[in-house]
Image: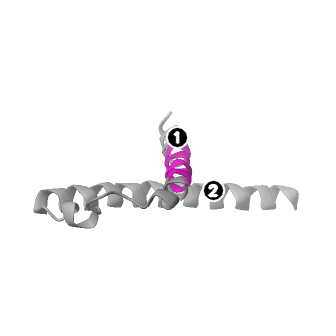
Amino acid sequence: MEGSENERSRIANNRLAAAVVVGSLCLVAAVWLLAQVGLLGDLIPARGPAADAVPLYLLVGLVAVGLVVWSWRRVLSFFE
């Protein structure tokens, strides 16, 4: 039974990695499209983010980058 639980865990990790890779590609495409249309400037506040929110933005950004790097490494390891 232990092997089947380990196999389910691997499948779940692979699905998560694939979902994050697809999501990151969609996010990059959406940002590129907004930049081409000229709407990206409307989404960014004129004076930048509030000072008390900067640590939260940094934390979310670091976690997101770590998750994207992990998932891309996992997906690209299939092609080795």
Image quadrant of residue 37?
A: bottom left
Packing grade of label 1 (10 A; few <14, some 14-19, many >=20) is: few
Where's residue 71, x and y in %? 53, 48
Q: Nearer the viewer, residue 5 or 50?
A: 50
Which of the colour schemes (rainbow, by chain, secondary structure, one colour) is used?
A: one colour
Where's residue 73, x and y in %? 52, 40
Magenta span of residues? 58-70
Residue of label 1: 73
Q: Residue 68 magenta-drawn?
A: yes
Packing grade of label 2 (10 A; few <14, some 14-19, many >=20) is: some
Residue 64 is left or right of residue 41, and the answer is right
Give SS at disc 1. Answer: helix
Labels 2 and 1: the sequence-earlier one: 2
Residue of label 2: 13
Q: Residue furthest right?
A: 1
Q: Residue at x 27, y 66 (%)?
A: 43
Q: CA distance from mark 2 to mark 1?
A: 12 Å
- Residue 61 image label: none
Where's residue 40, x and y in %? 21, 61
Give SS at disc 2. Answer: helix
Residue 18 is left or right of residue 6, and the answer is left
Q: Nearer the viewer, residue 61 or 15?
A: 61
Is 40 placed above or below 62 here? Answer: below
Is 21 placed above or below 76 here? Answer: below
